[in-house]
Amino acid sequence: MLFAKASSPYMHDDSSVQSIMRKVLYALIPGSLAAIWFFGWGVLVNILIAAITCLAAEAWVLWLRKRDIRNTLLDGSALVTACLLALALPPLAPWWLTVIASLFAILVAKHLYGGLGFNPFNPAMVGYIVVMISFPREMTFWTAPVGIAHSELSFLDTLQIIFSGHTSTGIDFDSITMATPIDTLKTQLGLEHDVETTRQSTQYSPLFDTISGVGWQWVNAWFLLGGLWLAKHKIIDWRIPTSFLLALTLIANFFAVYDYASYSSALFHVFSGGTMLAAFFIATDPVSASTTPRGRWIYGAGIALLVYVIRSWGGYPDGIAFAVVLMNIAVPLIDYYTQPHTFGKPQK
Amino acid sequence: MAAEHLKITQDGLWNNNVALVQLLGLCPLLAVTGSFVNGLGLGLATMMTLILSNTCVSLIRHWTRPEVRIPIFVLIIASIVTTIELAMDAWFHELYMILGIFIPLIVTNCSIIARAEAFASRNPVVDSALDGFMMGLGFLLVLVTLGGLREIIGQGTLFANAHLMFGESARALELRFSDHYPGFLLAVLPPGAFMGLSLLIALKNSIGRRSKQQQTASLASAEPVNA
């Protein structure tokens, strides 16, 4: 039986999962292109491996669960997970690492909990954490960004490294990989060097060029641009990225002012590592993020605090994935205490 | 009598398995199953405790007053565990060092006092001993399965350190599947234990459900013939 629904001028918004995910993918393009430009073909290869694995895993689980395979695959949510995961992984990660992370993301983090809309944790970040904990050595295979790399890898060399672990031309692994700026700074601070001398030293100054490192600042800037476009189209809520970036800036500034020698500047934190990708694409995941307006402020700020703590005092190079998943756990609690006041109900 | 023993066996190994159905004793189960041999060591110690405590509790069941039964059970179990602990320290010293606190902690394993209270205190000696053996064996099988799986996935080996239990000649038992296996640390770390156990429980449930479906299906197909 069909009831005609017509009273208030309800606005019809014809957005669907598919159109939202498509726009998210569009918004990822500029940042991804920048990442490919600076870190080489490995980024693209990772995206392809992750996409194929995620789609295949999703199709398999949907078949097992007797769900509609075609429509669910076409909604693009698995593809977005694959892209976010691949962009977070180091460009020269061996193929099996990307495959394991993708399988964990789709099979365990997404479908064991009931599929899209039921996953309490961000699937891409769960996949990332699994490989981060399990394969710490392989997770350091970051290529040196273009401009300061000793030798550049051709597409075929990259494929060969990812699929077999070495190249036929015998390029030394150490000449093409390099610690990320955040990692470098952490190591140097651990050796009792201060931030400024590390950034000025002849060994590391090329890496720390201008704001937050060659390549990294541009990749982050392009993700920021894509993210702003998403926020403008109301695909993502502006509160989470705003509160995340604002809180990260404030916390980083506080410590940088407090002790300039051993804490890097807020600008460095905001434009390095996965900050922008996290702010606009990972923390804003509609399923696992907080859903109330006030809750989103708390959620974003909580992630910022955890990211800063893990980056400054933790054992892992970047804390985005852990921070996001830890705050995902807190989401039901946050949402419970931040229910908006319903119009017409008496104020407590 | 035989039917009763069959039921005890089925309950212990499958239908009422300590680890997979009762979900008791999970702390040692999750903590020591990093490898097959560790699982086997703790499993055997727990099984011995279960057999002995069930036998003792069953022997004195007519003289135990219900008001004080729990302290009596605890005393019996604690003495047995202490004996086993000392014996392991003497004969399997290295394994004893690896299993560490989890051997004395067998005292607090709920499954042991649960069997004493629920079964041994109201059944004859032979049945109780069999129940202890089967419950212990069920627990042991889960321990070695989980330990074996975590060892294979985590380190790419099986039966590593077998000499800790079976003497020097058992060193050759160790299977190494690949020399270049990078190791899957997650399986060795505590989260791997939780995931592995949950997958085993899921597997058990799905097998149980499937056999139930088959039973009902065969009953349904048999009915018209009977009618």
Image (tube, coloured by chain):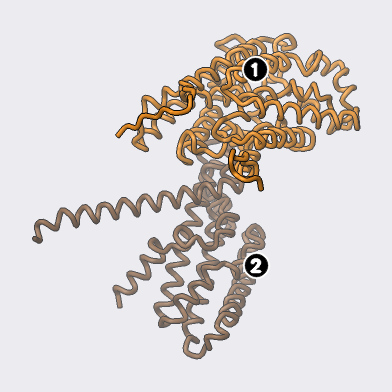
Q: Which residue is mark 1?
A: A228
Determine whether B108 is above or below A326 in the image.
Answer: below
x and y percentages locating residue A266 in the rendered image: 81, 25
Between B60 and B167, the one lying in front of the other is B60
Question: Residue B184: percent from the left, percent from the top?
Answer: 57, 39
Q: Which residue does the numbered mark 2 point to in the structure image?
A: B89
Residue at 56% from the left image edge and 46% from the top image edge: B192
In the depicted structure, whether residue B135 falls above or below residue B196: below
Chain assignment, label 1: A
Please state which of residues A312 and A200 is positioned toward the viewer in this rendering: A312
Chain drawn brown in the picture? B
Quick one: which chain is orange?
A
Q: Is residue A52 visible?
A: no
Amino acid of disc 2 = Asp
Residue A230 vertical position relative to residue B184 in the rendered view, above or below: above
Disc 2/disc 1 C-alpha distance (Å):
65 Å
Position of B211 with respect to B221 (left or right) is right
Q: Which quadrant: the N terminus of chain B?
A: bottom left
Please, what secondary structure does the residue beneath circle 2 have?
helix
